[in-house]
Image (cartoon, rainbow, N blue to C red):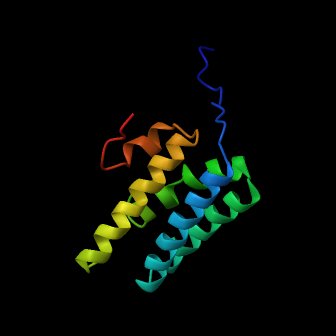
């Protein structure tokens, strides 16, 4: 029926380089969230990192395209930190993570909509 109920499949590239970049970005995001007492959000980042280590493509997709990461109030992308320098660093890291996610094959509109700067390609 016009493809309304067909789930789109994504091919995630977990190459060594991408895994290293995901690990670096997610680890620093986790540290900032944990230090800022956002333990729920920090835990969600660890769950995403776990899917990267396991190369669990379905798990990665489900964790990234989620209300916990991309949703509204209380989600990782909507965390607001009082300290300006730390807030800007977190925003930059999240943008880098979302851009890498897209470049790795997860070109979902929810991911694209949360990037605050434009991709170069």
Is residue 17 in view? yes
Residue 94 in percent (x, y) is at 42, 59
Q: In this view, does 47 lie above or below 109?
A: below
Q: Nearer the viewer, residue 20 or 43?
A: 20
Q: In the image as oriented, which residue stretches furthest toward the top?
A: 2
Kindly identify the residue that appears in the image at 62 percent across and 53 percent down. 17
Task: Give residue 112's position: percent from left, percent from top.
Answer: 42, 41
How far from the left and from the top, in percent, is residue 62?
63, 50
Q: In this view, does 49 lie to the left or right of 31?
A: right
Which residue is depicted at the point 30% across and 47% down?
Answer: 117
How many marks can you see? 0
Judging depth in this view, the residue of 6 and 50 nearest the camera is: 50
Residue 75 makes an appearance in the image = no
- If the image is split into quadrants, where does the C terminus sit? top left
Q: Is 77 drawn above or below residue 79 in the view shown?
A: above
- Quadrant of the rendered image containing residue 89: bottom left
Near-viewer residue (14 or 49): 14
The residue at the point 63 percent across, 14 percent down is: 1
> Which residue is more in the foreground, 111 or 31?
31
Against 58, is 39 above or below?
below
Q: Residue at x 34, y 63 (%)?
A: 91
């Amino acid at each position: 029926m016009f493809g309304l109920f067909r789930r789109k499949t994504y091919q995630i590239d977990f190459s060594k380089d991408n895994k290293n970049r995901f690990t670096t970005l997610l680890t620093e995001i986790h540290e900032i969230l944990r230090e800022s007492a956002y333990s729920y959000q920090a835990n969600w980042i660890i769950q995403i990192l776990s899917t990267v280590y396991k190369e669990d493509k379905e798990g990665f997709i489900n964790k990234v395209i989620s209300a916990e990461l991309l949703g509204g109030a209380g989600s990782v992308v909507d965390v607001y930190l009082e300290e300006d320098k730390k807030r800007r660093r977190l925003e930059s890291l999240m943008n880098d993570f979302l851009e890498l996610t897209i470049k790795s094959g997860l070109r979902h509109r929810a991911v694209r909509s949360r990037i605050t700067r434009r991709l170069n390609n």
